[in-house]
Image (tube, rainbow, N blue to C red):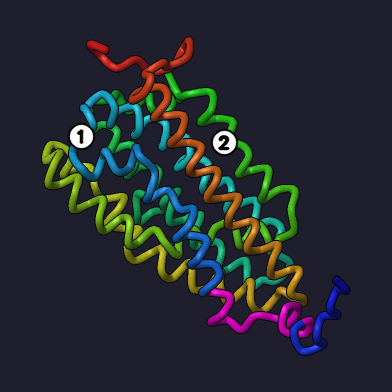
Amino acid sequence: MAVQPVAPQAANRDNRLLSVDELREQLQAVGEERYHHKHPFHLLMHEGKLSRGQLQAWALNRYYYQSIIPMKDAIILSRGPDPVFRRAWRKRVVDHDGDATSEGGVKRWIKLAEATGLDGADVRAGKGILPATRFAVNEYLNIVRSRSLLEAVASSLTELFSPQLITLRVDKLRQHYPWLSGGLDYFEARLYQAPEDSQFAVNYVHDNAQTRAEQDLAIQALRDKCDILWAQLDALYFAYVQPGWPPPGAFRVEGA
């Protein structure tokens, strides 16, 4: 059977630049498929089925990710040739590191870890963090260092999906783990920070991707970021849920 030629209209349609709404739709589809809101570890958390020790392991390992976010943003900031871009992106560093008027997201996460019963100094020192957590998080830094600025910006767009998950998470943590209520300031701040940040990043990707191929690279960068978040939870699940095999040197759940 002879191969039928591709109609010119179809070829043009496949390669045309996505509008900002179409781009957002494709980015949202990545989140629906790959964002870690569907991970079994998070499902257990939202069902109230995690022990205090398992929540401690989550807070400890997630801290390593939180701690590199301002470093990630500083790398992106340093790569931006446009002062308008740099001024906008600088806000992210302050959001996480804090300044004279705000304690910042990293410190807020320490408060959450302390609410689980962990020692804040141990958390800051990274005592007991899973090796797989370090590998996954460090790969995120590699993405923003080694790929194009467009891809680095796009990798931050998990912020498109996080407000919905944060709203659910805060409700479920308060419901099932009321002893954590004093440590939830991090999530409440992100509910208004993330939408503003994601709108800027979507517009930047749309305005600066010159070809459909560049748009596709940006979408792939977001997929890769989702995979990094998923891999972190895979490591937690393996070490602390099933089969429950934390590696040498990793945090141990008391009584496990």
Residue 123 located left or right of residue 131: left
Question: Residue shown at 76%/78% (left/top)?
Answer: 15
Q: Which image quadrant for residue 42?
A: top left
Residue tagged 1: 49
Question: Residue shown at 49%/62% (left/top)?
Answer: 91
| Outermost right residue | 2
**Residue 98 covered by magenta stretch:** no
Q: Earlier in the sequence, mark 2 or mark 1?
A: 1
The quarter in which the C terminus is drawn is: top left
The amino acid at mark 1 is: Lys
Residue 203 located left or right of residue 235: right
The amino acid at mark 2 is: Ala
- In this view of the protein, which residue sits in the foreground, 150 or 76? 150
Residue tagged 2: 136
| Outermost bottom residue | 9
Vertical position of residue 74 compared to residue 200: above or below: above
Residue 46 located left or right of residue 123: left
Asked which secondary structure carries label 2, the reply is helix
Q: Which residues are magenta?
A: 11-24
Closer to the eye: label 2 or 1: 1
Q: Which image quadrant for residue 149?
A: bottom right
- In this view of the protein, which residue sits in the foreground, 9 or 136? 9
Residue neighbourhood size for the residue with mark 2, other residues' Cα within 10 Å, grouped as few (<14), some (14–19), many (≥20): many
Vertical position of residue 61 compared to residue 93: above or below: above
Residue neighbourhood size for the residue with mark 1, other residues' Cα within 10 Å, grouped as few (<14), some (14–19), many (≥20): some
Q: Where residue 229 appears, x then y in whole percent? A: 49, 44
Question: Residue shown at 22%/51% (left/top)?
Answer: 170
The quarter in which the N terminus is drawn is: bottom right
**Residue 22 covered by magenta stretch:** yes
Q: Main secondary structure of the magenta part?
A: helix
Question: Residue shown at 15%/38% (left/top)?
Answer: 177
Q: Where residue 139 appears, x then y in whole percent? A: 63, 39
